[in-house]
Amino acid sequence: MLAGISCGVLPARSQAAPPDPGYAPAPANPGYAPPPPPPPSDLNSALLQWTPPALAQLSAQAAAKSSFTLDRNLLVAAASLTNPDDATKQAIAKLDGVSVHMLNFGAAGMADPALIDSIRQAYHLRGWKHLVSSDSTGGPIRNGKADVWLVVDGTNVRGGVVLVESPKSVTLVTLAGNLSPTDLLRLRGHFGIPRFEGDRLKDAQNN
């Protein structure tokens, strides 16, 4: 979704630990040549499995929580039950998987703002492209704002993350696949992705 999206950096993969999506160390010398990126299937798995550490801390504070992951086969089966429009079908066809984390903090609770900021900072440190929802004039949505990060491999978008926060709940959705910002908007309301406000996405740095 959106033209002119700059590229982030994808992880260098080691044998000792699973790849950390979007992160790679700086080269030690000018002759450093990074290893080739992991195969798409491995990258998709890494994208869906990794979450910022602050999410686990928020989860421990939540009164109720739910997490699930849908692979391509489950996504196709779920889509067949909802009869989406053609544009949404095209967006679903680009998905390789979806991972959803929903936290509810109950009537007397609320999400810790510091931990929410830590989640945002974790994606920022990995160089993922940060977008926010905006209205038809390009202005940011102040109530019910959604944060979106895109994971890029060269010029290709390989996935995205949607973070939607309300006073009593937090939803974090990771999507793997060859997606655009417009695809993410079309997927709202499907597979646990919240129906966040706004009819477009814009660079968060331009707010």
Image (cartoon, rainbow, N blue to C red):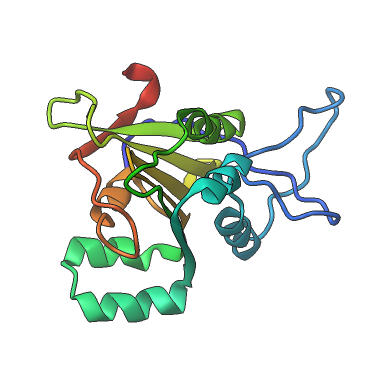
Q: Nearer the viewer, residue 87 or 133?
A: 133
For the point 51% across and 28% down, the residue is 114
Give how far across and how far down residue 98 sits, in percent: 45, 62
Side (left or right) of 168 relative to 86: right
Give how far across and how far down residue 151 sits, in percent: 51, 43
Task: Determine if residue 31 is in view.
Answer: yes
For the point 44% across and 53% down, the residue is 63
Q: In the rendered image of this protein, does residue 155 appear above or below residue 84?
A: above
Give how far across and how far down residue 202 sits, in percent: 30, 29
Give how far across and how far down residue 101 sits, in percent: 46, 56
Residue extending farthest to the left is 136
Side (left or right) of 140 relative to 55: left
Q: In the rendered image of this protein, does residue 130 appear above or below residue 197?
A: above
Residue extending farthest to the front is 108
Q: Which quadrant, please, contains the N terminus? A: top left
Residue extending farthest to the top is 206
Q: Which quadrant, please, contains the C terminus? A: top left
Task: Determine if residue 158 is in view.
Answer: no
Side (left or right) of 111 relative to 77: right
> Total label count?
0
Q: In the rendered image of this protein, does residue 29 appear above or below residue 17?
A: above
